[in-house]
Image (tube, rainbow, N blue to C red):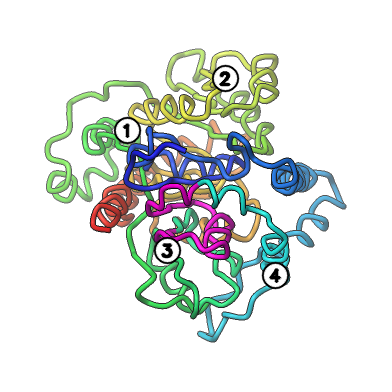
Amino acid sequence: MDNYGKAWVVAVNMGYGHQRTAEPLKDIAPRGKVINANDYPGIPKKDRKIWETARRFYEAVSKFKKIPLVGEGVFSFYDKFQKIPSFYPRRDLSRPTFGLKKIFSLIKRGWGRDLISKLKQNSLPLITTFFTPAFMAEFFDYPGEIFCVICDADISRSWVSLEPKKSRIKYFAPNSWTVNRLELYGVKEENIFLTGYPLPGIDLRDALKNRLLNLDPKKEYFSKYRILIKEILGELPEKSNHILTIMFSIGGAGAQKEIGLKIIEALKNKIANREIKIILAVGIRKDVKYYFEKKVKGAEVIFNDNINDYFTRFNQKLKTTDILWTKPSELSFYCGLGLPIIMTPSLGSQEDFNRKWLLSLGAGVDQENPKYAAHWLFDYLESGRLAEAAMQGFIEAEKSGTYNIKEIISLR
C-alpha cells in the first residue's frame, strides 16, 4: 500500500453511510483513496465471505421488513441485537453484547489480519468509519493510533471494544449524545473527541440565503426572525437562484423507493408546471436506477457506477436543494448545512435515535402520508416551518467536523 498521506482512511461499502462519512477525509489518505475493509485488492476469500454474508443479511432483512404481518416481527428480532439501550437512568453499560462477542470470535480466528498487516507497512494514524476495522487494528497490534468516526447521533454497544477501559481506540464523536454514550459504555474520557460529523465542503451561507426564499414563500418565518437571519446570513437576495427543489435520497438497500414514486405522483402537476423540481438520488445500484427510469417522468435521477463520483454529484446538487427527504441515517447531520430534513420511517434502533436528535434540534420533521404531499408539504412551506428547520439545523448542529478531525490528525 502507498506510503504517502497523513492517515489511513478505512470504510466499508455496506450501504452508503460509512463511505459517505469517509469521503470528506479522503484528501488526507495516501493518494486520496479510502480503503474499504470488506473490498480491497488482495482481500482473502474467507474475509470477503464474512463481510459479504453480513451485508446480504442486512439488505435482506431491510427489504423483508415491508412484507405484511411477518416483516416487522423479523426485523424487530434482528434489531434487538443492535438495539441502543435507554440513556436513563445513568448506569454502567460496559458489559459486551452477544453480537460484539461474535465479532471478536471471528477476529480471533484471523478475520482482518491481512488488512492490518498491509496497513502496518506504514503505521500512519488509522481513521475508520466503522467499528470492526478498529477492533481488528487493536487486536492485531497495529502500531499507529486508531481512530473511529461515529456516523450516527447515538450508538449501540457494538461500537466499543470488549474491554473499553483497556482499549486504546479513540473516537471522533458527532455530538454530545455520543460523547455521553461512549462514557456509559466505559470509554476513557481522554479517548473521546467531540468533533462534529465530517460534512462535505459546501458554500453554506449563499446556499441557505437562496434556500430560505423558497422555504418561506409567505415570509412567515422571516417576519418573526428578520434580525436573526440578517445577523447570521446578511442580506438575502430578492429572488432565489432556483425553483423549489426536493432531493429524495434512497439508502443503499433501496428499501424506500416506493415512497419516491408516491412523492412524484402526488406532485406531478406542480412538477409539470415547473413549480417544483424533484431529484431522486439512487446511489450506485443499477436496479434502483432502472426501477425509476421505467416508472418516473419529470424527475432528475442521480446515479453513478463509482461511489466517489456519486458523492461528488450528490454534494453539488445540494447547493440548489431546498429540502432533503430521506430516512434518518447519517444524512441527518446534513441539517448542519442548513437543509431541513423530511424523515421517512426509521429503519433500526440507530435511526430511531437519529430521528429523535433531529426533532430535538427542530431541524427535521416526520413525513406525513406521501400520497398527500401536495397538501401537507405546502402547508409546511406557507407556515415557515421548513424555513425554521433549515435555520435550526444551521445554527445548532456542529458544522466543522471535517476540519476538526483533520486538525487533530495534523497534530499527531
Considering every residue shown, the one lying at the far front of the view is 121
Q: Position of residue 365 (x, y in %)?
A: 48, 49
Q: Secondary structure at mark 1?
A: loop
Counting residues from the start of the chain, the first of labels 1 and 2 encountered is 1
Query: Residue beneath label 1, please?
Result: 217
Magenta-tinted stretch = 119-147
The quarter of the displayed image where residue 234 is located:
top left
The amino acid type found where label 1 is placed reads Pro
The quarter of the displayed image where residue 176 is located:
bottom left
| Residue that appears at 57% across and 80% down | 94
Counting residues from the start of the chain, the first of labels 1 and 4 encountered is 4
Q: Is residue 89 above or below residue 320?
A: below
Q: Position of residue 276 (x, y in %)?
A: 44, 22
The amino acid type found where label 2 is placed reads Lys
Q: CA distance from mark 1 to mark 2?
A: 20 Å
Callout 1 crowding tier (Cα within 10 Å): few <14, some 14–19, many ≥20: some
Q: CA distance from mark 4 to mark 2?
A: 50 Å
Q: Position of residue 23 (x, y in %)?
A: 42, 38
- Compare residues 366 and 313 and report the one nearer the observer: 313
Q: Secondary structure at mark 4?
A: helix
Query: Residue beneath label 4, please?
Result: 101
Q: Is residue 254 left or right of residue 357?
A: right
Q: Nearer the viewer, mark 1 or mark 4?
A: 4
| Residue that appears at 87% across and 52% down | 70
Query: Residue beneath label 2, please?
Result: 268
| Residue that appears at 19% across and 45% down | 229
* Labelled disc at residue 171: 3
Counting residues from the start of the chain, the first of labels 4 and 2 encountered is 4
The amino acid type found where label 4 is placed reads Lys
Disc tally is 4
Counting residues from the start of the chain, the first of labels 3 and 1 encountered is 3
